[in-house]
Amino acid sequence: MTLKSALILGAKVLALTITLLICFLGAAMVSGLSSAPATPDAHASSGDARVSPLMTFLVFLFPTVVLTRIVLRSRWFGWKLMVALFLGFYGVSTVLAQIESVIFLPNILPAGTIGRLFIMGAIAAGVFIPLAVLLLGRMRNGAASPDSNHPSRLALKETLLKLVGVSLIYMLLYFSFGYFIAWKNPVIQDFYGAKDAGNFFAQLEWIWRTTPWMFPFQVFRGLLFVLFTLPTIRMLKGSSMEIGLTTGVWLIAWSGQLLLPNPYMPASVAMVHLRESVPYHFIFGCLMGWLFSRHHASARDLQGGSVTRSNVA
């Protein structure tokens, strides 16, 4: 890449970052979220409401850079690319985040807030994605470019096995990181009004006794992660390792939202959730991208055996 090209790309990323911020601010107003009455939790401090303009810019810069990378490494163009990006954007940044709010924050968030968050995310994604594809020059119609490193289609049995496998792995990562990083922290225990059962297995046993539905619910969340992200994985160029790393970074690109002011969650709690969620989402994303960007004819392939690849038409 020449210096001129790098400067042009940098200017586009800067413009897209500002556009993304404006899209979220506009979506908040249209959805009614910005005018909704806030009832800050008693745990929150007045300092939680302050954040520097630089921090706000960086929070929106990170997903913009990642999305730019995805667009430029995509084999798809036009509407097909926009649909895939919308599913990834809206699914990861809004749907998968807010369905947990339904479970854990029903008594903290004011009535109607979660619905407004879903609407805000849809509006922001629906406006920003076409603008990003247009500005990055990927609107032209055309067939998907071939990539010899990418499988044309995974067999149904292989796909189902991988869906089940990664969904179960997501559940294990969720409970493991959730317990050792978040749940053992007194700040989290105080905020949610709970206590540590003593050890990891005792905690799982307590969850099984009190909320047994939490286990299939987290398996379902893992499945949703795959369904929302699979179109992005399918459209990316590159080796399985590159696609896996890109997917991992894509899943954590929206984690910076926890650094922004939140009248319903104190900054101390948000920071614990940030330290909890970033590692396991990155690990899960890398695994998911690697698995679904290549064929595995048998379990031996997972241990470094032969891998079947085919060209993409």
Image (cartoon, rainbow, N blue to C red):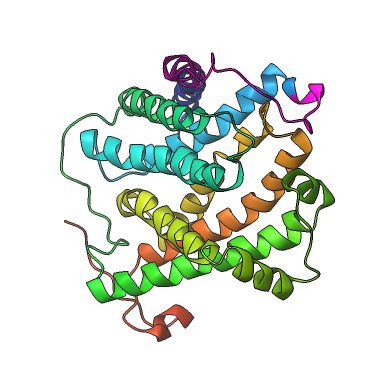
Quadrant (top left, top right, bottom left, bottom right) of the N terminus: top left
- Is 283 or 183 nearer to us in this picture? 183
Among all residues in the image, which is located at the extreme right? 186
From where the camera sits, is residue 214 visible? yes
Residue drawn at (52%, 28%) of the image? 113
Q: Nearer the viewer, residue 125 or 76?
A: 125
Where is residue 90? Give x, y as percent: 41, 37
x%, y% of residue 52?
72, 19
Q: Nearer the viewer, residue 174 or 226?
A: 174
Task: Find residue 174 and report its horizontal and vertical position in percent.
Answer: 59, 60
Residue 101 against residue 178 in the figure, above or below? above
102 relative to 269 in the view: left or right = left
- Residue plotted at (74% across, 41% down): 269
291 within the magenta span: no
* Point 68% across, 46% down: residue: 273
Relative to residue 299, is residue 161 depicted above or below?
Answer: above
Q: Position of residue 126 (x, y in %)?
A: 34, 27
Q: Can residue 241 be spotted in the picture?
A: no
Q: Does 32 lie within the magenta span?
A: yes
* Numbered range of the magenta stretch: 21-48
User: Split into 4 quadrants, where in the image is the C terminus?
Assistant: bottom left
| Vertical side of 179 occupied by 22: above or below | above
Decide: is 196 above or below 269: below
Total numbered labels: 0
Q: Residue at x 72, y 30 (%)?
A: 41
